[in-house]
Image: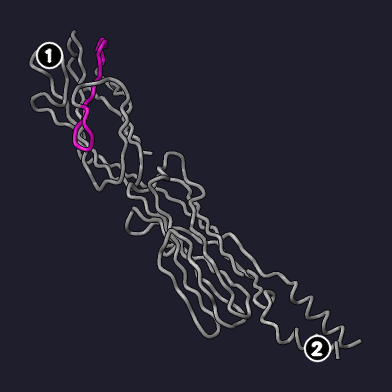
């Protein structure tokens, strides 16, 4: 009887964190390219990043504020604005967020995997110096 | 024995990872953000006193350089030099330039000049050149130049 009682308690208990456990299965790097507007460098003109996250019960997914990680010497990085936007889809739903320089988050529904398409863009009113630019965004799930 | 095994399975599942994160990187390369063109070479003419050969003398024509910059570039004009002269020319000249339009250097200078460029559409830089020689010039053709570099 004691064992049956214990099993009943375990089965009736609310979902434990492990049931919402998630993992980042795949993430591809993005490519920034110049747009027709010389003040914008965007992955919409290049290649967006695609991230696949596994999760079963309403995983909460957070997209950090995007950061400019590297730029060529002489570029006035303080005048640049870095933003990210996303589109996410899972079995029975979707979510999207427009360009923002802040953190964005959403809760996905029940499903086996969430596919997130992430875009980054850099805007510099003074244009861009020749050279290489890198932005970075951290995606977390729980 | 089967019931404890089920319990152990449930407990192990509850101890699984509940958080994951990854960094996503975007890279981009910007190139060819500056273009120079010289639609109008300059022509130098002799001053009335015969000591200045300059593009701003009567019948002279300044050079016009068209600049397009899509970013924070630097335009450099090298120190002007006399690159050709007729045989028998004794030398001793001073070569100078000044410019206006895209940027302004109103008085003649003999040294290298730099101009900070931002985001600018096609814009003209008008360059005047002069060769000054108190001893005058031998008859013939003279060529002076400055090299423009955008980077």
Q: Residue furthest right?
A: B1
Judged left or right of residue B126, residue A22 is: right
Q: Quadrant of the N terminus of chain B?
A: bottom right
Front-most of B145 and A19?
A: A19
Front-most of B105 and B146?
A: B105
Question: Measured from the top left, where is residue B58 in percent x and y?
Answer: 8, 25
Q: Quadrant of the C terminus of chain B?
A: top left
> Which residue position holds label 2?
A5
Question: Could you tell me which residue is drawn at 25 percent across and 25 percent down?
Answer: B143
Judged left or right of residue A110, residue B151 is: left
Q: What is the secondary structure assignment of the residue under circle 2?
A: helix
Residue A48: which numbered mark, if any?
none
> Which residue position holds label 1?
B50
Q: Tell me which colouring the rendered structure shows.
A: one colour
- Residue B40 position (above or below residue A36): above
Give the residues drawn in magenta, as a range.
B87-105
Question: Measured from the top left, where is residue B84 in percent x and y?
Answer: 28, 22
User: What is the spatial separation of the Cα atoms under label 1 and label 2, in whole angstroms?
Assistant: 115 Å
Asked if residue B100 lies in the magenta stretch, the reply is yes
Q: Which of the 4 image quarters holds residue B9?
A: bottom right
Front-most of A70 and B114?
A: A70
Question: Measured from the top left, where is residue A88 in percent x and y?
Answer: 50, 74
- Residue B32 position (above or below residue A142): above
Question: Measured from the top left, where is residue B113 in percent x and y?
Answer: 31, 27
Q: What is the secondary structure assignment of the residue under circle 1?
A: loop
Asked if residue B92 lies in the magenta stretch, the reply is yes
Q: Do the residues under discs 1 and 2 have CB atoms within 8 angstroms?
A: no
Which of the chains bears the disc numbered 2? A
């Amino acid at each position: 009887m004691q064992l049956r009682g214990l099993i009943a308690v375990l089965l009736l208990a609310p979902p434990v964190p492990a049931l919402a456990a998630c993992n980042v299965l795949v993430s591809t790097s993005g490519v920034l390219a110049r747009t027709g507007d010389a003040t914008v460098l965007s992955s919409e003109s290049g290649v967006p990043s695609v991230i696949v996250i596994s999760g079963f019960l309403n995983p909460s997914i957070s997209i950090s504020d995007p950061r400019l990680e590297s730029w060529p010497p002489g570029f006035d990085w303080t005048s640049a604005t870095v933003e990210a936007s996303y589109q996410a889809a899972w079995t029975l739903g979707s979510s999207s967020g427009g360009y923002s320089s802040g953190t964005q988050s959403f809760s996905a529904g029940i499903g086996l995997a969430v596919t997130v398409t992430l875009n980054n863009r850099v805007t510099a009113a003074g244009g861009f110096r020749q050279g290489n630019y890198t932005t970075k965004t951290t995606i977390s799930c729980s | 024995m089967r019931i404890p095994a089920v319990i152990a399975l449930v407990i192990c599942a509850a101890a699984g990872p509940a958080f994951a994160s990854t960094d996503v990187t975007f890279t981009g390369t910007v190139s060819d953000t500056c273009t120079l063109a010289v639609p109008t070479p300059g022509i130098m003419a002799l001053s009335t006193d015969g000591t200045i050969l300059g593009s701003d003398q009567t019948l002279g024509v300044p050079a016009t350089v068209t600049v397009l910059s899509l970013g924070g570039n630097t335009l450099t004009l090298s120190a002007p030099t006399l690159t050709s002269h007729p045989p028998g020319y004794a030398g001793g000249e001073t070569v100078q330039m000044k410019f206006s339009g895209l940027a302004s250097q109103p008085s003649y200078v003999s040294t290298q000049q730099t101009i900070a460029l931002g985001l600018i559409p096609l814009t003209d830089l008008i360059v005047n050149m002069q060769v000054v020689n108190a001893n005058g010039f031998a008859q013939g053709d003279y060529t002076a130049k400055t090299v423009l570099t955008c980077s």
